[in-house]
Image (spheres, rainbow, N blue to C red):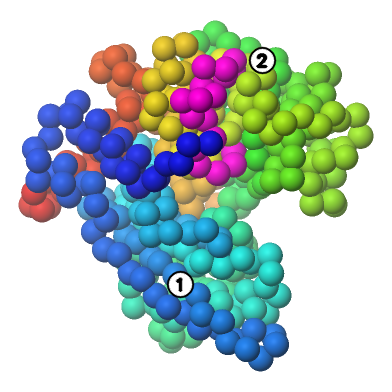
Amino acid sequence: MESYNSFRVAQQQVKEAARLLHLDQPTIDLLQWPQREFSFTLHAKLDSGKTRIYHAYRIQYNYARGPAKGGIRFHPDETIDTIRALASWMTWKTAVVDLPLGGGKGGVCCDPKTLSERELETLSREYIRATAEFIGVDKDVPAPDVYTNPQTMAWMMDEYETIMHRHHPGVLTDKPQQIGGTEGRRDATARGGVITVREACLLHGLDPTRAYAIQGFGNAGQRAALLHQELLGGGRLIAVSDSRGAIYNAEGFDPKELVTHKLRTGSVLNFPGSTIIPRESLLELDVEVLYPAALENSITQQNADAIKARIVCELSNGPTTPEADLVLYKKGIHVIPDILASAGGVTVSYFEMVQDNYSYFWEEELVHARLDKKLAKAYHTVQEAIKEKQVHPRLAAMVVAVARVAQACKLRGWV
């Protein structure tokens, strides 16, 4: 697969949106770069007694509309440009769903699969010791991302409160409910994506009860498998993949049983009634809906022409390259871009921040209803931009988001 620098892709997306908005050059220059970047060298003692050094980052891309918001990744292949790109996309993601937040991202270069629970806790607390003065409910609010989870957030929140000597549950989101987490957060990313698929099917006359496929069967992929059935009235899940391989069954899998199998065995492979297929061929199946829920740059110029899905709902960050976007658009495939399709997670994280702020928590039904309203409205706002600008969906979503952030920057007198 061709190699892409994700940050250069993100910068190009900003340029294209800015051109359509006729923004002045200083504004374009401001929006193409993070406002603040932090790089840290962490040290953590392993169970063996040895000390290991880790490189870590926190980037606050833009905070014109509110505190920076974005996850923290524990991944061995993190780079400063990866984090920059993800922080950029978080800025546009919060803006496209009209949340009073900016965008940020963080990461630690490590392989969490090789670390014990105690070592992960130590590393989590070290990260907060390095970043504590730069984050906060009114500065920057992190959340989980790849290979981090609510337990990671619990350790980090505890370390932050220990340092600050006061109660600040809203400093991190997607925490366990017992210490300030919200109902409805576990499935929020997938639920938001499925809501946008529902709106797309209604608008374009497509049938969500036909076949669908999911690339990447982690948390978002598993939840999408279940919610597609629940919210859209059925559908045949005919293919899924994870880091170990891909499986197929033309008659469809039982999503609940497949999720159980994945959680029990750690992989989708060897599920009863499945046939192993090449992972790349999953993307090319004849399905109504394709959910890319793996890592970046899965759909490229090399394979885009082979995509047959009617809707591509991007639950992962940056799964489609700019060249592939144009191919899919010309083929008439309706892409629901990542900054819209996967915005359910940050939307409910924002709801968590609100609830933490006044120590009153909503019932799950209210969280779901407010998420549904936010994502449905954002979807149709982007569709209006598609019609007005005559551009592909990702560029339309960027136009909506960049316009909102640019306006905030101008109102503040930054440009």
**Within 10 Å of the Cα at label 1, are there few (<14), some (14-19), or many (20+) other Cα atoms?**
some
- In the rendered image, which residue does mark 2 sit on? 286
Magenta stretch, residue numbers: 293-309
Q: Which secondary structure type mostly characterizes the magenta part of the structure?
A: loop
Q: Is residue 388 left or right of residue 364?
A: left
**Residue 119 quadrant:** bottom right
**Within 10 Å of the Cα at label 2, are there few (<14), some (14-19), or many (20+) other Cα atoms?**
some
In front of the other: 156 or 289: 289
Give yes or no for residue 298 being in the magenta stretch. Answer: yes
- In the rendered image, which residue does mark 1 sit on? 55
Q: Amino acid at mark 1?
A: His
Q: Nearer the viewer, mark 2 or mark 1?
A: 1
**Labelled disc at residue 86:** none
In front of the other: 206 or 171: 206
Q: Of the two numbered discs 2 and 1 on the same chain, state the one appearing first in sequence.
A: 1
x%, y% of residue 356?
A: 47, 63
Residue sitting farthest toward the bottom: 49
**Residue 326 quadrant:** top left
- Does the residue at mark 2 contact the one at mark 1 (Cβ under 8 Å)? no
Dot 2 falls on a residue whose secondary structure is: loop
In the image, what residue occupies the spot 47% across and 79% down? 42
In front of the other: 48 or 38: 48
x%, y% of residue 350?
A: 44, 52
In front of the other: 19 or 220: 19
Residue sitting farthest toward the right: 272
Whether residue 202 is visible, yes or no, is yes
Q: Is residue 305 above or below residue 169?
A: above
